[in-house]
Amino acid sequence: MKAVKIGILGLGTVGGGVVNVLNRNAVEISRRTGREIIVTRASARDLNRERICDTQDINLTTDCYDIINDSEIDIILELIGGVTLAKDLVLQAIDNGKHIVTANKALIALHGNEIFAKASEKGVMVLFESAVAGGIPIIKAIREGLSGNQIQWLAGIINGTGNFILTEMRDHGRDFADVLAQAQALGYAEADPTFDVEGIDAGHKLAILASLAFGIPLQFEKIFTEGITKITRADVEYAEQLGYRIKHLGIARKTEQGIELRVHPTLIPERRLIANVDGVMNAVLVQGDAVGPTLYYGAGAGAEPTASAVVADVVDVVRMLNSEHPNTVPYLAFQTDQITDIPVLSSDQINTAYYLRLNAEDKLGVLAEVTKILADHKINIEALIQKEPLEGEITLPVIMLTQTTLEQEMNAAIAKIEALSTITGSVCRIRLETLG
Amino acid sequence: MKAVKIGILGLGTVGGGVVNVLNRNAVEISRRTGREIIVTRASARDLNRERICDTQDINLTTDCYDIINDSEIDIILELIGGVTLAKDLVLQAIDNGKHIVTANKALIALHGNEIFAKASEKGVMVLFESAVAGGIPIIKAIREGLSGNQIQWLAGIINGTGNFILTEMRDHGRDFADVLAQAQALGYAEADPTFDVEGIDAGHKLAILASLAFGIPLQFEKIFTEGITKITRADVEYAEQLGYRIKHLGIARKTEQGIELRVHPTLIPERRLIANVDGVMNAVLVQGDAVGPTLYYGAGAGAEPTASAVVADVVDVVRMLNSEHPNTVPYLAFQTDQITDIPVLSSDQINTAYYLRLNAEDKLGVLAEVTKILADHKINIEALIQKEPLEGEITLPVIMLTQTTLEQEMNAAIAKIEALSTITGSVCRIRLETLG
């Protein structure tokens, strides 16, 4: 059979990694697909920039449209990032009958519904394994590997930068700002770290995972997102003393009322495997009704791990091309006409446990006032630690773990606690999940 | 489209679990496949036995051949176990044009080459996700998710019974025989535990994983297998003191000389995620050249986790049936004509590090003799602990960790050490892998 021709949009870190993997593993990959795979064309903004890959056999251009309009090309790899140009290119490439592989989580999370509708109409494949958790085949695991289950919930460490920061804070007792600066210097964090540390990147990925797990539309805009910028060294240490680790999790859970979609710092019992996923590594824990808990772990970013997932998608397309039949695996795990818009719960309606830290004056009866407010809102306390005042402070840190409660009850209780004259400053609240 | 009809061979624990999952999750599953799936027929040895599943809509028979010869049935689930009858049934069912889903690791490991050849000829699918690591979609991960990689090695805890025993020995300082008896009482271990504790079951699974990873034929008979029966409580404790856990691992590694295929107790650094996989849980760590390390964790056995994988395979078949095209994903990850018979190394040729425990007389110069023998065989010592004699003993336990060496050098060195007049009994040797 003739070689399969690939056009790559964007020859940066990921694009370069893909070229390297396709070249280095060409024999192994064609043993798996039965076809030769050739990158014939690639686009780059600056043709003179130094590349991490060999480009001598690739016809380079600065114009992405040259590539998507090339009738010789079978598969387009969209690796330019961003959503405006990428969306236009992908839609036009689909219109031209090209199969698409993309690593662009924002594009899928924000415009996936439209892209898949068009792809379905044209009978082409759109694969996006590399868009979530880098090299971990988590999309395939949920879309195919767990397809006998009702997925009950999933929880993932799906942003390596955030996990690196939290790991460094714990391992070396360092402050957030200090570690962030180092992560930026090392190139793990962008100059503008908002996407990573505020949970927007994780939110894009969570929107995708939730759609695959529950058969709901992609709806990034309904995700509750809280970043890690307010986590203090003290919180990390108190959590540790109580047997927990703080991780920035994306959580999707199906309840009788609807779907919880949330990204926030979370205390997890330290004995859970996912609590021990450190540094820039990613992991996703998926709970199915039949299989129970399963965990998927690996590198969530980087040229080669991302390329691993991009190339796996290419292999899927090529294996399909061999039989010249239409796509059989639905884009979002469920058949297109079976995507159901189950309500996404507002953050008020989330059920979770909490870690609370407050600064109380060292006076008789303060704890009684606080615990009465919690009791009035039917919030049970699971553990309570009262610490000595920190050096130079006159207030006492009080740390509490609560049982699971409705977030709106907790919001109301916190407002009342903060209004107490014996409580200084605001209450630090971090959600807690046992993931058991 | 009309409903897909399933015939089940064997309605025991797994078969019953599959019926339950297909019934309970019928809506979710047909949302994923676009088709209704009905179990029309099932076979059982004793039709009057009580079942874990509802059988009122299933036409039951004691004759498996009734089912494979039923022209109405699209997919046969082979869940009877064993290799003789199972092989005959599967081959005949394939001849009849049925797609096959099997949970039978021994069948695939021992007769897979023949089965896939016949299936390829008839253009039917044979899926076996549940044959390795129960509900964990590890077959799909290797066959498809990591298909861009050269797999360098994989290491798995792929027998839950063995892992339960080792976990109990460590957590509660118990002896092997004692925990085995409890595991048998709990139903985790068979009355004849040989398959589990001697590594035969793990060997069957490793043969399958290695074939998928490297594109080599299934060759169970070439696997080096060592059980966990000789692991003592003392070894578990010494390993712990040195920062290691003992796990019964199946390891497949590609080297320049060939393929290492081995199942044996293994010391692993306790900080590795896989070292913390406890009880009956399974996990497989796969190292690809592009993706780096990835880990897959979940329940390796039980009615529902196994059913989860069986049903996922059914979903794969049904999604394919929708387009009435031939199978596009090769049975063993690589195209059939690309399976290469890379030599499997004999155990002599394995490269690994070691934990050694020996009983030495409390005399001057004993250690010098031992370490000279190791040095003569170019074996470097990484750590050495000399313990006080155990109560009532006159010899001293000496524990050593070595660097990586060729197994034949170690065999020769151990023979010489055991021949020393100052060494009592045999040398306990457990292999050690850093999995880094």
Image: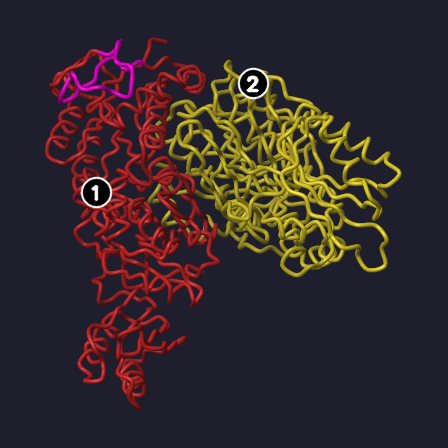
Chain colours: A yellow, B red
Quadrant in the picture for residue B361: bottom left
Are the residues under marks 2 and 1 on the same chain? no
**Residue A435 — which label?**
none
- Is residue A204 a member of the stretch shown in magenta? no
Which x, y percent locates residue A370?
A: 77, 36
| Numbered disc 1: secondary structure | helix
Which stretch is magenta?
A: B38-58
Residue B220 drawn above or below residue B55: below
**Which amino acid type corresponds to the residue marked 2 in the rendered image?**
Glu
Dominant secondary structure (helix, strand or loop) of the stretch shown in magenta:
loop
> In front: A276, or B164?
B164
Decide if residue A93 is in sight here: yes
Residue sitting at x 62%, y 38%: A382
Q: Which residue is mark 1?
A: B109
**Which amino acid type corresponds to the residue marked 1 in the rendered image?**
Ala
Report crowding for label 1: few under 14, some 14 to 19, many 20 or more residues within 10 A (C-alpha).
many
Give the CA separation, mark 2 to mark 1: 43 Å
Residue sitting at x 57%, y 56%: A52
Residue B401 drawn above or below residue A321: below
Quadrant in the picture for residue B383: bottom left
Q: Chain of mark 1?
A: B
Q: Which residue is mark 2?
A: A256
Apparent side of residue B339 relative to residue B296 in the rendered image (left or right): left
> In front: B375, or B299?
B299
